[in-house]
Image (cartoon, grey):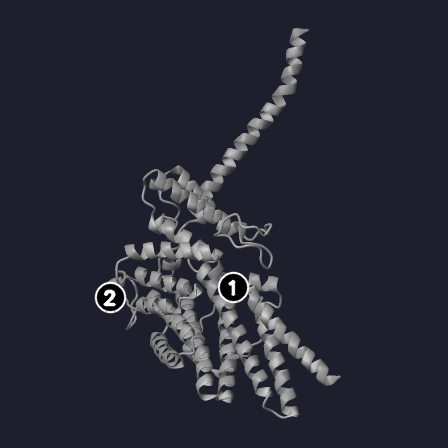
């Protein structure tokens, strides 16, 4: 009888124990495998190239080898890997709309960015743990935390990002590319916080690069190395924008002229016979920034001279230029300066908002993120060019006779519809393309208003 009970007990208990053992083993194996994949694949560093795109890659303390620094300890490394996973894979998960932290935004247009929220929590925990263990916080960790706070964008997050960026700048060598990039970042934060004068001073500081900031082995053009060219182009675009928005048109015109001339000098260096993807993306980047300065310059000239006809042509040209860049990013082809200005190759500005980025860039560890960012920027430039064209045509209509007014209103509607197409048509599609929801809502209101006006005139 006792043996029977033991046998029954064994038969009852043993299978769950075996199952629990397997589950535990698979869980441990899965967790270990995920950690190995994150360390050696997901967070791996891209290859260094003479064009310097690896300087824009995320460093999670592993430096040029990628991954995390073993000297941090086991728990901080787990936290940093979790942060990377949340940031890149979790995405947006709708929440209740209540923020668990002042750093987190409330629900707007479909939910708070839970991926960045969770990543911020993990990095903050890692920093607190390092402080508790009396270990220094690596600058790479501080920079990752600052960048995530920028994305969260609440006033408290921006204020914390500002303080962390100042700390990083105090540690950077004066005149280095690192210091210049941090000054640019601080200027962007100041502008977002409404501190325009401070932003201008910081961006002017970001233009100051010394020869010591040139890294050994980098390709040099007659003026700067490629990564510096892109940095300087970005600074000039920011300065141009803030001067124009503050109605300091004289200063905006000077900055636009200097920036355009500088970028033109960078583009004067002929591309290689068989340009690498890194080189192609570099030239597309500079061509895009040059196009943005052209668009901003047209707005300034319109304000100062009221030359509507030439301004309209520049808006249309800017839209076509942006379309060329989008197409080139979609095909992976090289666009030379001559091709870019050739009327026969400019095509039209019809929206190709759904065009995916070429596998040439998307499958590159180094180029995937900057390529996607440039594609987003080019789409938004096309959107803005059509939006400005529509606003100008709508404004011109008020001073016309009835027949010309109707034609101008219809043309403005077409421009707004083209802008909406480039923006993704809907808020959800626009978010997937990197277009702020507020931009799409504004354009849709313009389209609805003109459609209502035309329907009223027809009735």
Q: Earlier in the sequence, mark 2 or mark 1?
A: 2
From the viewer's perspective, is residue 124 above or below residue 52? above
| Quadrant location of the C terminus in the rendered image | bottom right
Q: Tell whether 321 sits left or right of 253.
A: right
Question: How many other residues sit within 10 Å of disc 1, few (<14), some (14-19) or many (≥20)?
Answer: many
Please say if the residues under marks 2 and 1 sit with CB atoms less than 8 Å apart. Answer: no
Kindly state the secondary structure of the residue where label 2 is placed: helix
Q: Tell whether 164 sits left or right of 351.
A: left
Q: Is residue 50 visible?
A: no
Picture coordinates of residue 456 (x, y %)?
A: 72, 82
3D distance between C-alphas at marks 2 and 1: 35 Å
Picture coordinates of residue 387 (x, y %)?
A: 55, 76
From the viewer's perspective, is residue 303 above or below residue 419? below
Picture quadrant where residue 112 is located? bottom right
At 47% from the left and 85% from the top, the residue drawn is: 302
Question: How many other residues sit within 10 Å of disc 2, few (<14), some (14-19) or many (≥20)?
Answer: few
The residue beneath circle 2 is 211
Q: Residue furthest left?
A: 212
From the viewer's perspective, is residue 280 above or below residue 169? below
What label does residue 357 carry, if any?
1
């Amino acid at each position: 009888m006792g043996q029977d009970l033991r046998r029954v007990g064994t038969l009852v208990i043993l299978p769950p124990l075996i199952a629990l053992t397997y589950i535990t083993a698979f869980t441990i194996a899965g967790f270990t495998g995920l950690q190995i994949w994150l360390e050696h694949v997901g967070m791996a560093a891209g290859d260094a190239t003479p064009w310097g795109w690896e300087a824009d890659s995320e460093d999670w303390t592993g430096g040029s080898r990628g991954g995390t620094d073993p000297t941090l300890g086991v728990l901080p490394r787990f936290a940093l890997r979790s942060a990377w996973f949340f940031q890149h894979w979790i995405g947006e998960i709708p929440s209740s709309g209540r923020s668990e932290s002042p750093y987190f935004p409330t629900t707007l247009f479909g939910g708070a960015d839970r991926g960045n929220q969770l990543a911020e929590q993990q990095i903050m925990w890692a920093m607190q743990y390092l402080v508790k263990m009396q270990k220094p916080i690596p600058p790479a960790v501080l920079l990752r935390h600052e960048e995530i706070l920028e994305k969260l964008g609440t006033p408290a997050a921006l204020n914390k990002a500002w303080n962390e960026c100042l700390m990083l700048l105090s540690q950077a060598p004066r005149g280095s590319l690192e210091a210049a990039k941090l000054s640019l970042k601080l200027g962007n934060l100041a502008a977002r916080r409404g501190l325009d004068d401070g932003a201008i001073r910081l961006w002017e500081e970001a233009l100051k690069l010394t020869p010591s900031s040139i890294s050994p082995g980098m390709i040099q053009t007659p003026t700067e190395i490629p990564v510096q060219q892109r940095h300087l182009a970005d600074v000039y675009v920011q300065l141009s924008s803030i001067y124009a928005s503050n109605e300091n048109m004289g200063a905006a015109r000077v900055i636009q002229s200097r920036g355009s001339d500088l970028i033109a000098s960078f583009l004067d260096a002929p591309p290689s016979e068989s340009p690498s993807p890194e080189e192609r993306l570099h030239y597309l980047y500079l061509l895009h920034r040059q196009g943005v300065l052209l668009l901003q310059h047209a707005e300034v000239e319109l304000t100062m001279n009221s030359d509507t006809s030439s301004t309209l042509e520049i808006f249309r040209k800017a839209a076509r230029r942006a379309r060329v860049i989008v197409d080139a990013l979609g095909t992976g082809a090289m666009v030379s300066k001559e091709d870019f200005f050739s009327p026969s190759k400019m095509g039209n500005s019809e929206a190709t908002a759904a065009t995916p980025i070429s596998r040439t860039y998307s499958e590159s560890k180094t180029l995937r993120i900057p390529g996607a960012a440039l594609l987003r920027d080019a789409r938004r430039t096309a959107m803005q060019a059509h939006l400005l064209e529509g606003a100008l045509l709508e404004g011109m209509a008020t001073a016309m006779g009835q027949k010309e007014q109707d034609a101008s209103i219809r043309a403005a509607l077409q421009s707004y519809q083209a802008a909406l197409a480039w923006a993704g048509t809907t808020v959800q599609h626009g978010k997937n393309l990197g277009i702020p929801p507020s931009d799409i809502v504004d354009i849709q209101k313009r389209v609805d208003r003109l459609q209502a006006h035309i329907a009223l005139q027809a009735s």
